[in-house]
Image (cartoon, grey):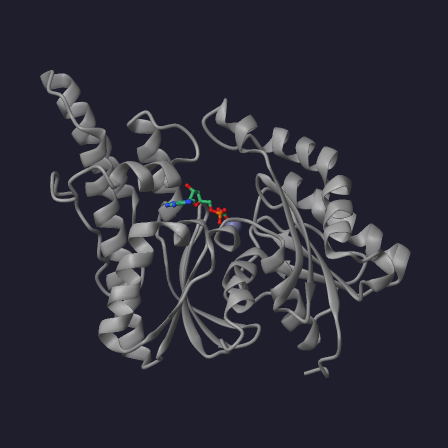
Amino acid sequence: MKEIRDLNILAIETSCDETAAAVVHNGREVLSNIISSQIDLHKLYGGVVPEIASRKHIEKINQVIEEALKEADVTLDDIDVVGVTYGPGLVGALLVGVAEAKAIAFARDLPLVGVHHIEGHISANYIEHQELEPPFLCLVASGGHTHLVCVREYGSYEILGRTRDDAAGEAYDKVARAIGLGYPGGPKIDRLAKEGNPDAVKFPKAHIDGAEYDFSFSGLKSAVLNYINGCKMKGENFDPADIAASFQKAVVEVLVENSMKAVDDLDLYKFAIAGGVASNTALRAAMKQACKEKGVKFYYPSPVYCTDNAAMIGAAAFYDYLGGTQHGWDLNAVPNLKLGER
Ligand code: KG4
Ligand code: ZN
């Protein structure tokens, strides 16, 4: 590991539909965190349109970086390292951030550090929990991923379980569409579920034999769609709030059960959540309770650091850089990058 000195990292994130830049000091202190969301644009199409996302990133990226520097009250002269998400994600979207980061690093003769997006989500926990250090367990649940990860040490990840089909956030988004809530569905279901009865409909929870940490959400999603279609065919009314609450209960219970099994098996007393779904109020409450019952310390980022942002990339880039990671000018976007690959 390199010696920690005062390192300012300019971090860039463009893997999906947020154009984001941040300045992060020594991995844990966020000097600025600017996010330009494209949600309003993609809402019109019911989901992210990759071509539109790339074009919007190109339009916004310079402005977002300028704002991040201004808000941090620094100039490029004060930046020591440039960090950027290079995968996984939408290839055209990733390329905008990667090209921008390479251009700045090359022009300023700065080290360039490519970051794995999921590693960024996990590292979001370092920002508000100064005392958190590996080893710990982390559930990463986002629109594209559902991973149960053991963080052995900084930059070292063991994937214990993953989804076999849909990601948790993807299931939220699809169910939300089916009950007419629109995109992105997660926050809308979260809100609506508070008005519904979680025991109104019994939806199935998938557990996979022989792979007790893995997840599967496509069966649950189909069960919700079948239930709605069944009601429509019979001319019966259904209450969207009850469906939202019952669906959410099934998702949250599986996420908590698998996570707590890993906590028991690995005998680790620190557990964190990350990713867009980690901002879900029901999941946060259930995890908090489950961790409390086991005497496990529970960590979770503020909602702004759960969904896509660049501060989390700055936190991850710091520890990667200290661990010796530095990329060359041939760094490319890797849409299916595996966690732990360099
Ligand atoms: O981490 P993220 O911003 O992007 C990816 O890396 O995918 O996660 C976005 C996902 C979307 O599927 C969105 O519906 C979900 O996170 N999400 C939520 C909530 N807020 C965002 N899901 C459930 N409850 C929420 N409050
Ligand atoms: Zn993400």
Q: Is residue 87 above or below residue 172?
A: below
Name the spot of residue 132 as percent of width and height, x first.
49, 75
Q: Quadrant of the C terminus?
A: bottom right
Q: Residue at x 26, y 45 (%)?
A: 248
Residue 275 in view here: yes
Image position of 11 (left or right of 316)? right
Quadrant where ligand 1 appears? top left
Q: Nearer the viewer, residue 137 or 189?
A: 189
Image position of 303 (left or right of 94)? left
Image position of 168 (left or right of 333)? left
Residue 342 in view here: no
Q: Quadrant of residue 76?
A: bottom right
Q: Residue at x 32, y 39 (%)?
A: 191
Q: Quadrant of the N terminus?
A: bottom right
Q: Nearer the viewer, residue 208 or 39?
A: 39
Q: Quadrant of residue 226?
A: top left
Name the spot of residue 311 as percent of width and height, x first.
62, 57
Q: Residue at x 75, y 47 (%)?
A: 65
Name the spot of residue 223 as percent of width and height, x first.
20, 37
Q: Is residue 160 above or below residue 55?
A: below
- Number of numbered tags placed on the structure image: 0
Name the spot of residue 320 as percent of width and height, x first.
65, 71
Q: Quadrant of residue 224?
A: top left
